[in-house]
Every structure is written in structure tokens, then in C-alpha cells.
Image: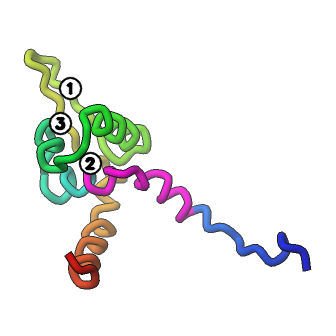
Amino acid sequence: MKKSELSVQRCTTISTIQRIVGGKWKIEILYYIGLQNINRFGELRRHIGEITESSLTKQLRELEVDGFISRYDYKELPPKVEYSLTDLGNSFMPVLDFMKKWGEAHLKQ
């Protein structure tokens, strides 16, 4: 048999999910916004700790483009921007909560 005949069909759903939430910080960003109600840029950066400002900006923009979060600019000085989950992002929270609980039960800290 040829190698192509033996190859397993790729799961496009899992591939898409991995592309969307597979960024280095995206799961953690979604955790803080969705499960900890932390929605300001500075607060997110303080909680994540090691993330650079440019990485946080990039990951937030990607999550917004993918429809998981929305950005609200208050149009005031000093600038005030808040992030919140969209319906799509909210629908992902039970998955994220399950992942957290699984990790607490099965992974050594």
C-alpha cells in the first residue's frame, strides 16, 4: 500500500481549535477574562507576569479577530479599554474550566 492510503484523516475541527487557542498566552488570557473577570490590559499583564506588552496586544487582537473576545474603548483620557468574552468565548468557558480541573487532578504542580 502507498503511504497516502495508510495515512489517517486529519481532524480539521481539532486543527482549527488549536490554531485559535494555540498561542502561547491565549488560554491564560481567556482564563483571566472569562473565569477571573479580569478585563483591563494592565491587570491582564500583571496576572500573566511574563508576557510582554506587544505579545499581549497581539494575542488579544487575534482572539478578537477569531470572535472569542470583544474590545470596548471608552474613548477617554487616559485611555481606558476593556475586554470581555463574546457568546463564542462564553461557550468555551466550560471547556476551559474542565481543562483547569483536569490539570489540578492529574498534573503535578
Question: At 43% across and 55% down in the image, what residue appears?
Answer: 22
Inter-mark Cα distance, 1 to 2: 15 Å
Q: Does residue 21 belong to the magenta stretch?
A: yes
Q: Which of the two residues, 2 or 109, is positioned nearer the viewer here?
A: 109
Q: Are marks 1 and 2 in contact (CB under 8 Å)?
A: no
Q: Which mark is residue 85?
A: 2
Q: Residues within 10 Å of mark 1 (few under 14, many from 20)?
A: few
Q: Position of residue 109 (x, y in %)?
A: 20, 75
Question: At 16% across and 18% down in the image, what residue appears?
Answer: 75
Q: Are marks 3 and 2 in contact (CB under 8 Å)?
A: no
Q: Does residue 25 belong to the magenta stretch?
A: yes
Q: Residues within 10 Å of mark 2 (few under 14, many from 20)?
A: many
Inter-mark Cα distance, 3 to 2: 14 Å
Q: Position of residue 72 (x, y in %)?
A: 22, 31
Of the residues shown, which amino acid type is indicated by label 3? Phe
Secondary element type, mark 3: helix
Q: How would you classify the magenta stretch by its main secondary structure?
A: helix
Q: Which mark is residue 41?
A: 3
Q: Position of residue 67 (x, y in %)?
A: 39, 44
Q: Which of the two residues, 66 or 103, is positioned nearer the viewer here?
A: 103
Q: Which of the two residues, 73 or 55, is positioned nearer the viewer here?
A: 55
